[in-house]
Image (cartoon, rainbow, N blue to C red):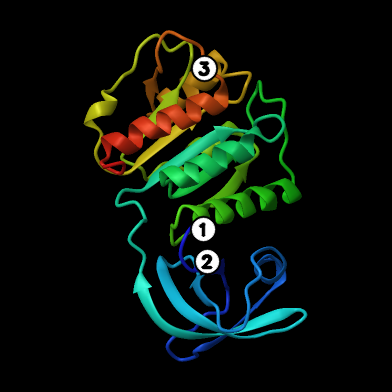
Amino acid sequence: MSGARRFFSDNINYPHITEVELSGEEFVHAKTVLRVEEGSEIILLDNSGKEYSAIVTSVGKRALSAHITGVTDGNREPNTPVYLLVGALKGDKTELVVQKATELGVSAIGVFSSRYCSAYINDNKLERLNRVAREATKQCLRSAAPAVSYFSTLDEALASASEYKNKLFACEFAGYSDGDMSQLSGSTAIVIGSEGGFSEEEFALAKDKYSFSSLTLGKRILRAETAAIAALSIVMFSLGELK
């Protein structure tokens, strides 16, 4: 990553307050990994989509101070909201999906449990996923990190996408896609299952109760993490986000 180093801060109140203190994990990363020093130029993010240019004025043992010199609107956020819902995956595969989805430009991510899901999410894992999203946001020069939420049931996850214009449900036994992904426009939610896939009842729930359209990704069976990244790439291209 080139240019000024980027850090998230919760206590920005610019232009009323121009001095900001960076502490916690962001400070540790800045000091011990990136070797940020007094006089370094940095960019602060507060998840509003704005980017605050700042100069480090002091570096202490537990925090650093920075003076904000200006603010701009970030220009790498998606124009169209895209919401990824993905079944919890084994090992660190969920982290991989969160990282790549953030890079591709999703606005929000929901991780859910379903009938054939054999992984689990606790508070520590959820915080870890949000940390992955924040790090990916900084790496790809976005200005706002997508929030990662957890749903203990598929029903709750599907309900959370009720306001999206396009609702796509990827299923290996769907047989055909209800819609043309190349003609997408407007906000889009896409659902990808865990390694175990979905049951017939879950497929019917998505279609009948929540009006999701079926989505297929070709004649080959893809791994869940591959399906998530591939489907998102197609959606983002169709929405003009990869041009």
Quadrant housing residue 113: top right
Report if the CB atoms under discs 2 and 1 are less than 8 Å apart: yes
Q: Residue 79: where, in percent of width, then height? A: 29, 52
Q: Residue 14: where, in percent of width, then height? A: 45, 85
Kindly identify which residue carries mark 1: 138
State the separation of the CA atoms marked 2 and 1. 6 Å
Numbered disc in front, either 2 or 3: 2
Q: Secondary structure at mark 2?
A: strand
Q: What amino acid is labelled 2 in the image?
A: Arg
Report if the CB atoms under discs 2 and 3 are less than 8 Å apart: no
* Residue beneath the point at 41% across and 18% down: 217
Q: Nearer the viewer, residue 243 or 118?
A: 243
| Nearer-N-terminus badge (2/3) | 2
Kindly identify which residue carries mark 2: 6
State the separation of the CA atoms marked 1 and 3. 29 Å
Q: Residue 20: where, in percent of width, then height? A: 57, 84
Residue 110 in sight in this render:
no
Q: Nearer the viewer, residue 96 or 87?
A: 96
Q: In this rendering, would 82 be left or right of 94?
A: left
* Residue beneath the point at 49% across and 89% down: 18
Q: In this rendering, would 72 be left or right of 93?
A: left
Q: What label does residue 222 carry, if any? A: 3
